[in-house]
């Protein structure tokens, strides 16, 4: 059963255009100019209970706006969304009882107080009976390994320690859906890995549906089963991680290193990087036979090392964005041409 | 998890008590700063008392107000202002919270965002303002348990009115983008008007004291009630305070529909 359904969700913001200079500012006082920005355009998708979905897109693609509409912070202009059977903008308070949210850039912990005090306050906010709060708190403290930080004021915690406490705090009321907006922003590699492990564990133990926006490809590859890619406010890809990676199988990254300088001229295939005795190639297996390429490379000299890798997910996503932008540019040029003729 | 439906008054009271405790703990984190600010504010207020004592000793009265009257409006204004900022410390930060997109955190929680955001902070120096009113009463003749009880009720009503006017001015941020300067002006005017005898102002402008800058309901009418122990007027004044609170709440809710959030980095202070 879907826990999130989104149909033709759209949101437009109106921003004031301010030109440079005092004269323009004074003119704007009398006759302000407005520009509308379509942040989200007819987005539709649904998420099943227990799914872990990555919601990806470049800066300004509409990720945060969508997540804010799903949590009831923003009201959509048109279209609709239902989360746990409720309409977020109308039933925000009731919905809040069933969802958790961590916005990497905004803290729900009191800055001057230790997390233990914030947890107590959140217990009152979510109306959790004292014995249940104590049990849940003990469980989360243990799982998230935050025991040593519980009595330290949040201002004295590192970002990694704080974000662990943030996620634990968002789970106090045992939400069924967890929204994470850039949860690993600004964290170092080790901490990122810990956070991902905790989220994977959370999904396994509690069956929590996780809806995550991120720039960080590692977040997505490690914990998500499905990716929705949004660009200029519209969904451009919605498929399983497997399918998305399958696109990558068409292209292989081959690295080769020889014992001595070798001739690396291959017909129809130029190396993307090369030195006297080493080179790397990107091979499109739809155009070249992989086996033949490898055989040809092995024939060129004594091979010290040979690697064949899938295209990194980051590059695939970048390609989707590039392709979409080029398509849009062509579309705009066509529209312009038609208008002129 | 099967829990009772949110929004019951008892649950709200528990939440407000927990928020108050957390705020107090946050303040006490910095003990020395707390004491300096509280006593600093009381000293600051006491300096004005000295000024009025000297002035009235020379003139006899100002606009029909004797020294005791001036001190009672000071006490009422100070304690009302103090209670408003002790209980609802974000009343004058609401605009910047809206502007910086920091309402998100409150909107994600199952409590009314207006109540939640206001109650999420306490202002340290306001404890000094709150205490100052009672300190003044302690030195005035005629203060007894009945007057103290009456004063507390009047100050509570005043606190609600202060909070309503300040938060309404700050909520204009939803509509104007930046209501900071306007809010600042409203704050200063409301406090200043509430600290001087009503009669020194031109009668043509006194309607302001019973409408947009309601010093009349914070200081002048409560002074009359306090002087003559006019208990029947207390529920009327509290009713007026409730009307102002309702207006401020309505304005916030109307503005909330225009809230655009934002992605500024921030932390909860």
Image (tube, coloured by chain):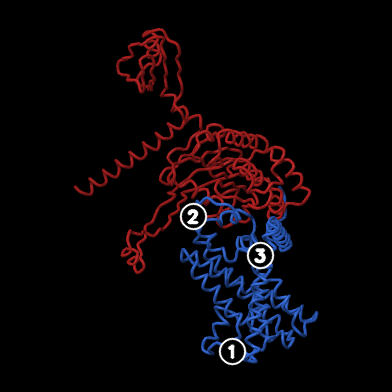
Q: Residue furthest right?
A: B145
The residue carrying mark 1 is B199
**N-terminal-most mark, 3 or 1:** 3
Please state the chain letter of the residue tagged with numbered disc 1 in the rendered image. B
| Residue lying at 50% horizontally and 34% vertically, measured from the top left | A217
The residue where tag 2 is placed is A76
State if disc 3 and disc 2 touch (CB < 8 Å): no
- Supply the letter of whichever chain is blue: B
User: What color is chain A drawn in?
Assistant: red
Left or right side of A274 for A164: right
Q: Determine the CA span between mark 3 and mark 1.
A: 33 Å
Using the image, determine if residue A3 lies above or below residue A18.
Answer: above
Residue nearest the observer in this picture, A188 or A142? A188
The quadrant in which residue A251 appears is: top left
Instruction: Check chain identity for marks 2 and 1: say if they share one.
Output: no
- To which residue does mark 3 refer? B37
């Amino acid at each position: 059963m879907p826990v999130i359904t989104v149909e033709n969700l759209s949101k437009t913001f109106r921003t004031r255009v301010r030109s440079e200079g005092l004269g323009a500012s004074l003119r704007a006082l009398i006759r302000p100019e407005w520009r509308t920005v379509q942040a989200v355009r007819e987005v539709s998708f649904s998420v099943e209970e227990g799914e872990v979905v990555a919601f990806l897109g470049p800066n300004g693609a509409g990720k945060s706006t969508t997540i804010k509409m799903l949590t009831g912070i923003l009201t959509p202009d048109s279209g609709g969304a239902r989360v746990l059977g409720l309409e977020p903008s109308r039933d925000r308070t009731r919905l809040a009882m069933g969802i958790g949210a961590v916005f990497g850039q905004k803290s729900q912990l009191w800055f001057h107080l230790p997390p233990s005090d914030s947890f107590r306050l959140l217990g009152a906010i979510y109306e959790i009976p004292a014995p249940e709060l104590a049990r849940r708190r003990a469980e989360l403290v243990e799982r998230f390994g935050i025991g040593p930080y519980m009595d330290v004021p949040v201002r004295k915690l590192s970002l990694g320690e704080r974000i662990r406490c943030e996620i634990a705090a968002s789970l106090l009321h045992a939400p069924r859906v967890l929204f994470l907006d850039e949860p690993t922003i600004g964290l170092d590699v080790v901490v990122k890995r810990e956070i991902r492990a905790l989220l994977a564990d959370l999904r396994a133990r509690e069956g929590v549906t996780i809806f995550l926006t991120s720039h960080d490809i590692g977040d997505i590859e490690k914990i998500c089963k499905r990716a929705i890619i949004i660009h200029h406010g519209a969904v451009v890809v919605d498929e399983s991680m497997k399918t998305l990676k399958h696109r990558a199988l068409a292209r292989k990254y081959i690295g080769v290193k020889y014992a001595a300088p070798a001739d690396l001229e291959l017909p129809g295939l130029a190396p993307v990087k090369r030195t006297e005795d080493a080179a790397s190639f990107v091979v499109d297996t739809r155009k070249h036979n992989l086996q033949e390429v490898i055989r040809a490379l092995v024939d060129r000299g004594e091979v010290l090392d040979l690697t064949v890798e899938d295209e990194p997910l980051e590059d695939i996503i970048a390609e989707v964005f590039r392709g979409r932008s080029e398509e849009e540019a062509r579309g705009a040029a066509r529209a312009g041409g038609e208008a002129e003729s | 998890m099967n829990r009772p439906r949110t929004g019951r008054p008892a649950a709200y009271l528990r939440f407000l008590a927990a928020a108050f405790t957390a705020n107090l703990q946050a303040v006490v984190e910095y003990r020395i700063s707390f004491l300096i600010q509280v006593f600093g504010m009381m000293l600051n207020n006491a300096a004005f008392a000295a000024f009025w004592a000297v002035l009235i000793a020379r003139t006899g009265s100002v606009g029909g107000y004797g020294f005791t009257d001036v001190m009672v409006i000071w006490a009422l204004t100070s304690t009302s202002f103090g209670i408003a900022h002790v209980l609802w410390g974000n009343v004058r930060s609401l605009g910047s919270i809206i502007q910086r997109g920091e309402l998100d955190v409150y909107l994600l929680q199952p409590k009314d965002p207006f109540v939640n955001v206001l109650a999420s902070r306490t202002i340290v120096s306001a404890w000094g303002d709150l205490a100052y009113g009672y300190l003044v009463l302690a030195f005035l003749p005629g203060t007894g348990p009945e007057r103290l009880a009456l004063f507390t009720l009047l100050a509570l009503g005043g606190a609600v009115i202060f909070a309503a006017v300040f938060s309404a001015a700050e909520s204009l941020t939803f509509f104007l983008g930046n209501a900071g300067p306007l809010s600042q002006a409203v704050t200063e005017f409301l406090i200043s008007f509430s600290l001087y005898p009503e009669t020194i102002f031109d009668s043509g402008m006194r309607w302001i004291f019973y409408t947009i800058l309601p010093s009349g309901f914070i200081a002048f009418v409560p002074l009359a009630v306090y002087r003559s122990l006019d208990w029947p007027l207390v529920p009327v004044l509290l009713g007026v305070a409730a009307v102002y609170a309702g207006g401020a709440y309505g304005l916030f809710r109307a503005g909330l529909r225009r809230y655009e959030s934002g992605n500024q980095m921030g932390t909860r202070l």
